[in-house]
Amino acid sequence: METPCIALLLTGNELMSGDTVDSNSAMIATCLGDHGLEIGEKCTVGDDPTLLQSALARLAQQYPAVIVNGGLGPTRDDLTSEVIATLTDTELTENPEARAHVENWCARRRIEPNPANLKQAFVPAGCQLIHNPLGSALGFAINVKDCLVLTTPGVPSELEAMLPALVTHLEAQVGGEARQILRLQTFGIGESSVEERIKKYADRWPNAVTLGFRAGMPQLELKLSVPSAAHLPAQEEALALLEEDFGDHILGKGSTRLAEKLQAVLRNQNKTMTTAESCTGGLIASMMVREPGSSAVLGTGFVTYANRAKRDQLGVASTTLKEHGAVSEPVVREMLLGALERSGADIGVAVSGIAGPGGGTEDKPVGTVWIAWGTRDDLRTHTTLVSGSRSLFQNIIAAACLDLIRRHLQELPSLPHYFSRQA
């Protein structure tokens, strides 16, 4: 059976001008794909009633369902309800449920609803409302000829909260069988490396399993997709192959984040960590404290950007700094030992590098970095070169530092793929 295709119509001048980057269509496509529903076409128009009406009329003729994203807000350029009322030859009427929703939304914020707020209570007569748990504008479902049209607000968080209701409407109208997708979060191995490795056991790869990728920073998501629940054993076979080959790069399933994984490992081992940062400026510690529960595993972190700070806060010897320079193995060793001593932590990481765009030399070009990680009794170091912008350099190095601690604690290979490949 062919996968049902759905059209997506996005509206907003901010999308056309580039002031807002479209992330909603990716969110919708990902959610629908998990339920055996695919986007066949995506169309974006500005806040022009003629263009919007023309685009929706065309899509409604060609697809069993259309999702309209945007144009439900309180301002004059929010035109979705008006355009759909024209297309369906219905009146815009004040819906009592929609009005109550707007009034309650305003009451929670201790504001009086004004005419602009109440504009959102006017929807095409006979439509079915779609609850919006976060925003003031409800969505609605309506038939345009034989096409199901679903309207949604453009605010990403509101759209995300409404997606389950959209799926329910679509499954009732156009069907679709939910694919079974296993998402794996990885760090330190790229798409090309995964593809090359899989070639080695292509003859063992289950035919029912499709491997997909979603690249991000700093992680890469692998998706193992099978057509239905009946193929879950094949999915497990594919997972076993990946774990056998590069399991040390797999952080976990679902939405597991690198810092989240490291926190779990630290808690399981009843250990704490510390950081001593120069070129990353506190980013390593920041990644940790973004996750809830970080106070149980991270008590102290040091940002010692200047040589004086390395000396005064961490006890790095002036002679070491003078003889070897701030970006050197001896300095990061002393930085880490000082941080461990002063914090009382069980394990830690220290980093010093040249983030650029200036400051490089022939011996130490921009992108050079030294990392020390481990414990007082088992301290390891490595140097590498990361090319790219200052921001990219800092993000990659900060993530690698967290991963190195994770590997140390879990007794995984000490030189991961992202370093050994360079070597």
Image: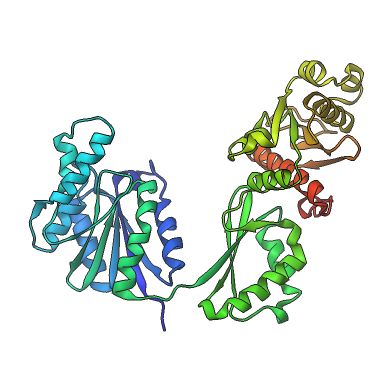
The residue that appears at 14% across and 62% down in the rendered structure is 87
Foreground residue among 113 and 401: 113
Give the color scheme: rainbow, by chain, secondary structure or one colour: rainbow
Residue 164 can be seen, yes or no: yes
> In the picture provided, is 276 more to the left or to the right than 253?
right
**Quadrant into which the N terminus falls:** bottom left
> In the picture provided, is 91 more to the left or to the right than 71?
left
Image x and y of residue 153, in percent:
30, 50
The number of numbered discs placed on residues in the rendered structure image is: 0
Image x and y of residue 18, in percent:
39, 44
The residue that appears at 92% across and 22% down in the rendered structure is 323
The correct choice, above or below, for 269 with respect to 223 in the image is above
Residue 75 can be seen, yes or no: no
Foreground residue among 168 and 143: 168
The correct choice, above or below, for 150 with respect to 264 in the image is below
Image x and y of residue 162, in percent:
34, 55
Foreground residue among 356 and 56: 56
Image x and y of residue 260, in percent:
63, 46
The residue that appears at 87% across and 31% down in the rendered structure is 333
Q: Residue lying farthest bottom? A: 1
Q: Quadrant of residue 165?
A: bottom left
Q: Quadrant of residue 54?
A: bottom left
